[in-house]
Image (cartoon, rainbow, N blue to C red):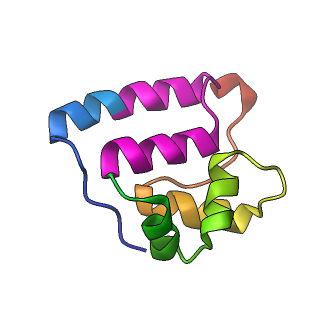
């Protein structure tokens, strides 16, 4: 799946993305909140358009962004890959 082009200028995007990733590593932002923030803030694409790009329904993407526990991991994977991320397990001491 293709990566999304950045919405903001490169340096500002890198700084903001590093801050978001720091918060993610600290457990201060959920996967769903991160997907929403990246989609809206860095890419600037609507929920409907991004869902279509990922091959997900709008409802499924909304549920991912709301951290609905009923969402399949395969759906979350489809939502994060175009943003340049992947799902993986990380040892707790690395958090």
**Residue at 60% over, 21% down:** 26
Circle count: 0
| Identity of the residue drawn at 42% across and 59% down | 46
Q: Is residue 95 left or right of residue 47?
A: right
Q: Is residue 40 magenta?
A: yes
Question: Residue 88: horizontal and vertical position, in percent?
Answer: 65, 50
Look at the image and give the residue range highlighted in magenta. 17-43
Image height of 82 relative to 63, above or below? below
Q: Dividing the picture into quarters, in which one does residue 29 lie? A: top right
Residue 47, image x and y in percent? 49, 60
> Which residue, as the protein is rendered here, is positioned at the far right?
70
| Nearer to me, 18 or 70 | 70
Residue nearest the observer in this picture, 48 or 17: 48
Q: Report x, y in % for residue 39.
A: 42, 50
**In the rendered structure, does residue 58 fall within the stretch colored magenta?**
no
- The x and y percentages for residue 23 are 53, 24
Q: Is residue 70 left or right of 73 when viewed as pictured?
A: right
> Measured along the vertical axis of the image, is residue 72 above or below residue 30?
below
Q: What predominant SS class does the magenta segment belong to?
A: helix
Q: Quadrant of the C terminus?
A: top right
Which residue is depicted at the point 25% across and 59% down?
A: 5
* Residue 9: quarter of image: top left
For this rendering, which residue is in front, 90 or 78?
78
Give the vertical position of 42 relative to 62 (above or below).
above
Quarter of the figure with the N terminus: bottom left
The residue sitting at 60% across, 67% down in the picture is 58
- Among the 4 quarters of the image, the one containing residue 50: bottom left
């Amino acid at each position: 799946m293709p990566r999304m082009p950045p919405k903001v200028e490169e340096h500002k995007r890198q700084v903001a993305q590093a801050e978001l990733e720091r918060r993610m590593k600290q457990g201060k932002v959920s996967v769903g909140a991160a997907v929403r923030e990246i989609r809206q803030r860095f890419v600037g694409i609507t929920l409907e358009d991004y869902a279509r790009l990922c091959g997900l329904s709008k409802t499924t993407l909304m549920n991912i962004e709301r951290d609905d526990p009923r969402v399949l991991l395969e759906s979350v994977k489809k939502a994060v890959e175009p943003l340049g991320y992947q799902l993986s397990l990380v040892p707790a001491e690395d958090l």
